[in-house]
Image: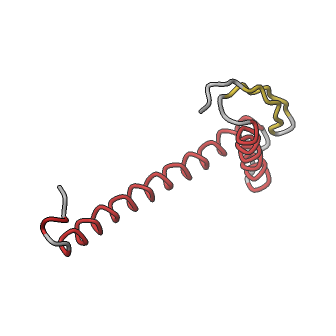
Amino acid sequence: MSGVKHSIRVTICGEDYNIRSDSPPEHTRAVAAYVDAKIREVLENASVVESHKAAILAALQITDELFEARQAQADAAEAMRTLSGELRRWLPPAKRGT
């Protein structure tokens, strides 16, 4: 993050929001567009009419995606540690490091 605050106007579910963020404006717009798309997806595919309830369901879906991504990252890191340990055994003792 750059520390510089950007003020960006975004639209989510037909409502305009002014967002102040350290992130670049393009990133903030992309995040807002993703949230908007998820809420609209819930509104189209569920029997939910109220936008605030759709927003909660969309937040649950987005959080589930986050948790799955974190688990995948943790699994990949563990696989890399395992592979690194296996490869280290193939190296001469002087090259193995600690």
Residue at image location 75% in from the left, 41% down from the top: 26
Q: Is residue 32 left or right of residue 88?
A: right
Image coords of residue 46 (percent x, y) = 73, 53
Q: Quick check: 20 above or below 83?
A: above
Occupied quadrant, residue 89: bottom left
Front residue of 27 and 18: 27
Task: Name the quadrant of the N terminus.
Answer: top right
Image coords of residue 67 (percent x, y) = 49, 50
Residue at image location 37% in from the left, 58% down from the top: 77
Task: Name the quadrant of the C terminus.
Answer: bottom left
Furthest toward the right, the residue is 14
Furthest toward the left, the residue is 93
Residue at image location 14% in from the left, 65% down from the top: 94
Image coords of residue 87 (percent x, y) = 25, 72
Furthest toward the bottom, the residue is 90
Color style of the picture: secondary structure
Count of picture labels: 0
Residue at image location 77% in from the left, 38% down from the top: 51
Image coords of residue 17 (percent x, y) = 80, 28
Q: Is residue 68 left or right of residue 11?
A: left
Q: Quick check: 35 above or below 3?
A: below
Q: Quick check: 89 above or below 76?
A: below
Front residue of 27 and 95: 95
